Image: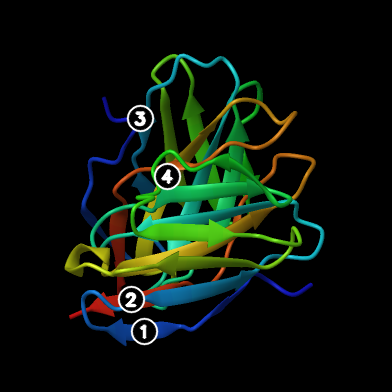
Amino acid sequence: AQKITQTQPGMFVQEKEAVTLDCTYDTSDPSYGLFWYKQPSSGEMIFLIYQGSYDQQNATEGRYSLNFQKARKSANLVISASQLGDSAMYFCAMREGGNTGTASKLTFGTGTRLQVTL
Amino acid sequence: EAGVAQSPRYKIIEKRQSVAFWCNPISGHATLYWYQQILGQGPKLLIQFQNNGVVDDSQLPKDRFSAERLKGVDSTLKIQPAKLEDSAVYLCASSPPTGMKTQYFGPGTRLLVL
């Protein structure tokens, strides 16, 4: 079974509008972390935002916020006030296990390509 | 603070040749990861080091891929012999020993096997 599912291969959004990128996950581990990364055409994976499974509040980082719905196992990324520079691939990823001990690997989804238009 | 460094950025080789990639993680990051990203897919872990010990290499094709991190800092990933299906971006990442242990990625090496 897919551990991370991103059902939107591509999304378009107009500049200055908000956009939501979907991510659902599957794990039986009670401790896990969810991450979003941006990958521009240059190829580098840029960390955007993190949500821990025990965090009570939704994570926010500037224009990025994570809509965490634990019961639904979803962790959607919301980008507010889109900019042309936001055009890129966006990956949702999960790390199973808590923050103690050796960090385990990230499992990535297949990504969503976001195109911001004028 | 310097980020994760990788070299080369691009490499073109013929099948059956060998190739090596180098990674220098962020200073103080004990954990180092090598991921393979095939076009149109998300990255997949090949190997994870904690200092100079291997934590997870379950998805490393050991008949042709090898990796080492001798002094617990720099790491090299080698492919010998390369196959067409090895064409991908090879990403190195590192994470700190404490906190949420976010993985920070380097720019990657784009490998094309002809």
Q: Position of residue A99 (x, y in %)?
A: 71, 31
Q: Nearer the viewer, residue A106 or A68?
A: A106
**Mark 3: amino acid:** Lys
**Mark 4: amino acid:** Cys
Q: Which residue is mark 4?
A: A92
Give the residue drawn at x 64%, y 56%. B94
Q: What distance separates the C-alpha of mark 3 from that of mark 4?
A: 11 Å
Q: Which residue is mark 2?
A: B111
Q: Nearer the viewer, residue B85 or A43?
A: B85
Q: What distance separates the C-alpha of mark 2 from that of mark 1?
A: 5 Å
Give the residue drawn at x 23%, y 59%. B40
Judged from the image, the secondary structure of the residue bearing numbered disc 4 is strand
B90 to A24, vertically: above or below = below
On screen, residue B30 versus residue B104, left or right, reads: right
How was this image coloured? rainbow
Judged from the image, the secondary structure of the residue bearing numbered disc 3 is loop
Question: Dot 4 surroundings within 10 Å: few (below 14), some, or many (20 or more)?
Answer: many
Q: Which residue is mark 1?
A: B11
**Mark 1: amino acid:** Lys
Give the residue drawn at x 21%, y 76%. B15
**Mark 2: amino acid:** Leu
Q: Chain of mark 2?
A: B
Q: Chain of mark 3?
A: A
Q: Position of residue A93 (x, y in %)?
A: 45, 42
Q: Chain of mark 1?
A: B
